[in-house]
Amino acid sequence: MKFDVTVTGLGDMALAFLDPAMEMRFVILFNDDAPAELAELAILHTQSEVYEAPAPGDTMKIGAKTYKITAVGDEAVQTLRDLGHCTLAFTADTEPYRPGCINLDGEIITEADVADGTVIQIF
C-alpha cells in the first residue's frame, strides 16, 4: 500500500470540476485540516503517510471504483506527503494535466463514490 485514507467530508464546490461541460474533469484532495478556503473545493480525508511514491502503472481505488494511474506530476508526490493534496484528473493521458496532478484512467466519480467513510488507496 502506497497511500491509504478515508474521506471525512466534501467541500461545497468539491465536485464542481466534474461538470461534463468542463474540458478537463478533476477533483482535488486535501487532508481534513485544510484551510476553509481550500476545503470548500476539496474532497477531505484523514491524514496518511505516503509510504511509497505513486507512479504510472499503479492502481488507485476510490471506494468501489478502480483506476490505473497514467501520469504523476512533478509536484504531486510532495504535496500529497505534505498536505494530503493532489488533483485527480480523469484522463488517461500519459502527461500530467498539471504539476500537482495524478491522471487516472477510468470512470469519473460521483458524489455517492466519495461519501464520508469512503476509502481511497494507491497500491
Image (cartoon, rainbow, N blue to C red):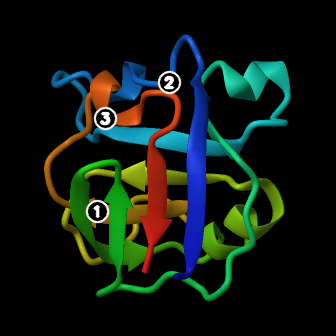
Q: Nearer the viewer, residue 96 or 57?
A: 57
Is 27 placed above or below 74 here? above
Is residue 29 toward the left or the right of residue 80 in the image? Answer: left
Classify 10 Å Cα crowding around label 1: few (below 14), some (14-19), many (20 and above).
many
Residue sitting at x 43%, y 27%? 115
Q: Residue 12 at what x, y percent from top left? A: 55, 11
Question: Image quadrant of residue 91?
Answer: bottom left
> Residue 44 location in percent, x, y?
63, 35
Secondary structure category for the residue under label 2: loop
For marks 3 and 2, give the one nearer the viewer. 3
Which residue is at 44% across, 86% downward? 55
Q: Nearer the viewer, mark 3 or mark 1?
A: 3
Q: Are the residues at dot 1 and dot 2 in contact (C-beta closer than 8 Å)?
A: no
Name the spot of residue 92 as percent of width and height, x first: 19, 66
Count of labels in the image: 3
Rendered position, 108 above or below 95 = above
Task: Give the SS element for disc 3.
Answer: helix
Specify the quadrant that holds the C terminus.
bottom left
Task: Give me the residue at 67% from left, 53% from top.
Answer: 85
Amino acid at dot 2: Ala
Is residue 48 visible in the rendered image? The answer is: yes
Tag shown at residue 104: 1
Q: Is residue 42 visible?
A: no
Q: Dot 1: what SS?
A: strand
The residue tagged 2 is 14
Write down the quadrant of residue 36 in the picture. top right
Measured Cα–Cα span from mark 3 to mark 2: 13 Å
Q: What amino acid is found at the position of numbered circle 1 in the picture?
A: Leu
For label 3, the residue is 113
Q: Compared to 60, does 72 lie above or below?
A: below
Q: Quadrant of residue 26?
A: top left
